Image (cartoon, rainbow, N blue to C red):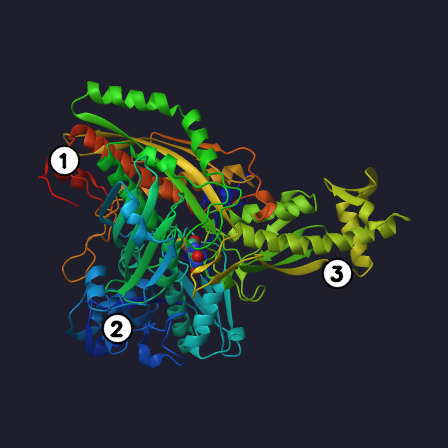
Amino acid sequence: MKSSDTLLHARGESTFVDDVALPEGRLFAAVCASSIAHGRILSLDAEEARRLPGICGIFTAKDIPGENQVGKTILDEPLLAEGEVRFVGQPIAVAVGESASIAREAVRAIRVEYDPLPAVFDARQAYAEGRLIAPPRTFSLGDVESAWERCRVVVGGTAESGGQEHLYLETQSAFALPTERGGVKVVSSTQSPSMVQLIVARILGLPMHEVEVDVPRLGGAFGGKEDQGTHWAALAALAAWRLKKTVKLVLPRREDIRMTGKRHPYSSDFKIGLDGEGKILAYEVTFYQNGGAAADLSTAILERSLFHATNAYFIPNVKATGISCYTHLPPNTAFRGFGGPQAMFVLESAIFKAAEEMGIEPWEIQKRNLLREGDVFPYGMRVERCRQRRCWEVAERKYGFQSLRHEVQEFNSRNKWLKKGLAFMPVCFGISFTSTFLNQASALVHVYVDGSVSVSTCAVEMGQGVNAKIRQVPAHLFSIRPERIRLETTNTTRIANMPPTAASTGADLNGHATRLACLAILDRLKETAAKSLKGAAPHEIEIREETVYLAGKETELKWESLVGQAYFDRVSLSAQAHYATPGLYFDREKEKGEPFAYHVFGVAIVEVTLDCLRGNYRVDSVRVVHDFGKSLNPCIDLGQMEGGIVQGLGWMLLEELMHDGNGKLLTDTLSTYKVPDIHFAPGEIAVHFLEDSENPPGIFQSKAVGEPPFMYGIGAYFALLKAMKAFRADLPVRFNAPHTPEKVLLSLYGRKHSS
Ligand code: LUZ
Ligand code: MOS
């Protein structure tokens, strides 16, 4: 089944926030932001800006009627800077005018004087200065200290991974309309409508019921609108509320890149110990996370790094510590994988280094240590329905790894300047929000008298196809044509207290809630049918392809007439249902629990070819065996897989954020910040759906698919290292992503240094 949005997108008919026709008299907002990374605001002079023709208002922190605070768990982030600025791009004022260009002109006319203060951009330096977002946390299993002496090989090192710009196609956007009783309605490009509602209410000093948030669809998000769609919605709401006019705020691309947070850069120390056979006995890791200037979701992201510190491997002795640090960069935030990728990169670095030390291939260590049924993670959960080894074995066989290996060896012996490298990348990703309370959702289903169906849930459609998946639920349970079913916008008046659409949980949580609501209606319809087919019992009734069956026999009764009959009988054709993932808990004292509904497993084999004269390279292939459960929608799942892989490759190989010495982003355009394009994409992406992989906790036995594929991209870093070693055996390896062609070239011809 196609995604319900496919045709609209292809024809350019999809309506994004910026496409909605606004009423006469609507205004436009632009943001005045800090030009320095840290300092005191001495003065703000907006007189000239206010006098510009077409300017309707300029608002600062002083104009906020409620609380100037957008922080969630940690209240450390003003909506508009007050007294102090903490990163380049921090909003200080919002200018509102009759056009976007007038508003921007006003922003340029605002004069801000600062008294600069020292700024920190590096997590380790921030740590040394005691700038912690929260106390460090440690997950442990067994006892690393006593394990080291039993190891034949112990190696240590550091691994660095960089940030990443989300580059959703639709930039941050929102508009707000004043409502009758002094409230506001906000249409926002956010993954978290309820969070926007809560924050707008807090900013305006209103009860939440006076703030309606509506989300039609997003042009991509990737985590960048889980927390950070809020600010722009709140600024539009503030202006609309003050001026009693509709106000729209859409960030231009460059401002979006400058002002919003990224994936967190990590700098990590590792130590790994193995026996003579390559079995990992102990692993110790410390993650220094660059949180930026406010907590945002940093502590949750760091927590997921701790959960995924051992990725797809069983390691009996583990000590993983995470330290989240304040710096003077824009607050870093959620991004596909949510700290998992950063942690997995460190362990793969440790394995690569250990393999070098032992003179064996990294995949020999990887394979020996893969998870088995019942193995325990450092966080206390046991792995169930473990398919890690099966994925590996199927991948080896299906993609002919042994011959691939020989072909690569032969290629490398025949070619002087071109070298190939291979790597495996196994992934094990836990599905559920690690904050247990977020694992709930609700749905509201209406069946109208003509048999058409309306479904509202917490899910935000952002191009991932969640609406198409949810639509399959009533289509299947009622056995009706999908065209009868409409997925509504995500709206806080229809659904309250939503979690963000995030953590790959959108289809599971909202699919289950929709299932429960549909089943409630179906029960009533079966009673109606039984009554009208005299003498029948509800349990004998079944609907197949819009026809009512009694005890397996077709009847005259069709879906539409059944619905009409129920209405005449005064039976409710609407249902609301709530779903909470069962069995989840986590004890933050002991750092043990059952945080995930299940795990997603898979393995990728990545092949690269490196031009050792120029330092540039091609990813020849990424070949995957992946456990989708019983895929709900193979077409959508394949799309998530391909997109995730390419995005992961971009993070590992290409995308490099560079700042000047004063914390100003230099790579704030697509000419300087390189993202994957079709030429960069692998020559081949092969995806094999693992067979026989039902998944009872998922919706209709499927598995979540959003984030796990991202991490296959990590394999490319190590395939490239193998190719580099094939060219220069004494090459000192360093683990410092992204592996840009420039860095590859410098290290191929650089002098020996240690990591
Ligand atoms: N968001 C969140 C997430 O709040 N908690 C999570 O565990 C999570 N995981 C992945 C992506 N977003
Ligand atoms: Mo999240 S990284 O928005 O799933």
Sequence order check, earlier mark of 2 and 3: 2
Quadrant hosting residue 106: bottom left
Q: Position of residue 589 (x, y in %)?
A: 43, 66
**Residue 140 left/right relative to 386:** left
Quick check: marks 2 and 3 in contact, CB under 8 Å?
no
> In the depicted view, which residue is nearer to us: 742 or 170?
742
Mark in the foreground, 2 or 3: 3
Badge 1 local density, few (<14 within 10 Å), some, or many (20+)? many
Is residue 228 visible in this depiction of the protein? Answer: no
N-term-proximal mark, 1 vs 3: 3
The answer to whether mark 1 is within 8 Å of ligand 2 is no
Residue 336 x/y as whole percent: 39, 50
Residue located farthest toward the right when viewing the structure as drawn: 535
Looking at numbered disc 1 in the image, what kind of residue is underneath it?
Leu
Residue topped by disc 1: 748
Residue 668 in percent (x, y) is at 23, 53
3D distance between C-alphas at marks 1 and 3: 71 Å
The three-letter amino acid code for the residue at tag 2 is Leu
Of label 1 and label 2, which has the lower sequence position? 2
Q: Amino acid at mark 3?
A: Ser
Instruction: Give me the residue at 58% from left, 51% from top.
Output: 511
Q: Which mark is residue 52?
A: 2
- Seen in the picture, residue 696 relative to 332 is either above or below; the reply is above
Answer yes or no: is residue 415 visible.
Answer: yes
Please tell me whether mark 3 sits on a helix, a strand or a loop.
loop
Marks 1, 3: nearer the viewer: 1
